[in-house]
Amino acid sequence: MCQNCDFRTGLFKNRILIETGVDGLYGRSGVFEDVIQRFDNLITSFGGVDKAEVVRFPPGMNRALFEKSGYLKSFPNLAGTIHAFNGNDKDHAALIDKLQAGEDWTLGQEATDVVLAPAACYPLYPTVAQLGALPEGGRLYDLQSYCFRREPSKDPARQQFFRMREYVRIGSPEQVTDFRQTWLDRGNELIGKLGVPFHLDVANDPFFGRAGRMLANNQRDQRLKFELLVPIESEEKPTACLSFNYHQDHFGTLWGIAQHDGEVAHTACVGFGMERVALALFKHHGFDVDKWPSPVRKALWG
Amino acid sequence: MNGTIRNLLEQHGRLPVTVSSLADDQDLYAAGLTSFAAVQLMLGLEEAFDVEFPERMLNRKSFASINAIAACLSEIAPQKAVA
């Protein structure tokens, strides 16, 4: 049932991650956070030369923009919305009564204007559209955010709240496909420094339902998504730790982002699953970071 | 059958060109059919012809032209395709 319980148990026993009672929702130790921070720095040591504009969004986004983003068309099952109490004293008393009676108290909750960010780049695109047409060289952003996807799992590499570092390129088709190729090469070199087994493969997003199977097949046919995979949960089903995505003009059309010449902008992004990379390191090098191989320690701690 | 396909393409395809200007063998993606519009077209075809496209047909190739769509429909529901 759980091929990976030993690793998960080891993470808890060694206080690398801290159990909360909900699968996929964990506390992080200082040791774990240090690895995340060092990996974050390693990414910057590869991407920093590009002088991307740094933007940090909180892990929530404007619900109206989220609705427009089309996320619910493709991933209704993964979305997390924020609801809150919006009643009067009487409603409050009713809530407390239900709570004490062990009944469902959530029915009176109302949707707020905030939803949880499903990816670091989702809040970005509408803000780029507001800036008007792109400069001739396009734009490049450096993002990082906690993200939410509702997919509870015993696999510690599939968390409901996790951090995603991203570089997002917005420009001409040539500019964004060059960017993706650069990061495919860099990704190989970067993960190569970590001493974990990995390979690249064509991939698809987990689109929902039958319509989703068609979208997934289209995405694969067009080789729009690649993943850099590391075995964590199992050898047969390695975990995507980095992803390289070419959205064509999907977001450019959706948000009305124009290139400098008026043509619709294309976009691409490279995403780093921060927790997944950290877990890959703990899986392959053990729970004691002081005993990790010296080339790996050098890559991360210098 | 191609007439029905054209009507559905008009309805769901969100193409920047008129469907009547397209030849039966013309590449619909080159004409501006997006992946998301292709999904809507697929669902529209299933309803109109009362069929379900099997997994192996849920790809770009199956919806690449009016002729390609007609060929898929003829294969999965030959009796309906004649009507």
Image (spheres, coloured by chain):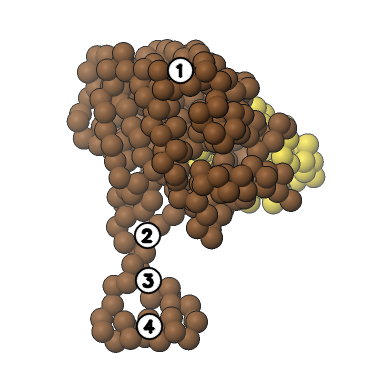
Chain colours: A brown, B yellow
The image position of residue A166, as x and y in percent, is: 39, 30
Of helix, strand and loop, which one carries label 1? Answer: helix
Name the residue beneath numbered marker 4. A96
- Is residue A234 positioned above or below A198 on the image? below
Which comes sooner in the sequence, label 2 or label 3? 2
Name the residue beneath numbered marker 3. A109
C-alpha distance separating marks 2 and 3: 9 Å
In this image, A274 relative to A86: left or right? right
> Which quarter of the picture shows residue B17?
top left
Which comes sooner in the sequence, label 2 or label 1? 2
Screen quadrant of the C terminus of chain A: top left
Q: Any mark on residue A146, and which?
A: none
Q: Which amino acid does the dot numbered 4 rest on?
A: Ile
Which subunit holds the residue at mark 3? A
- In the rendered image, is residue B82 in sight? no
Foreground pick, A189 / B40: A189
- Is residue A14 positioned above or below A226 on the image? below
- Is residue A80 positioned above or below A167 on the image? below
C-alpha distance separating marks 4 and 2: 20 Å
Q: Which amino acid does the dot numbered 1 rest on?
A: Lys
Which comes sooner in the sequence, label 4 or label 1? 4
In this image, B82 relative to A278: left or right? right
C-alpha distance separating marks 2 and 1: 42 Å
In this image, A60 relative to B25: left or right? left
Q: Residues within 10 Å of mark 2 (few under 14, many from 20)?
A: some
- In the rendered image, is residue A9 in sight? yes
Q: Residue at x 25, y 25 (%)?
A: A53
Name the residue beneath numbered marker 1. A298
Q: Any mark on residue A82, and which?
A: 2
Of helix, strand and loop, which one carries label 3? Answer: loop
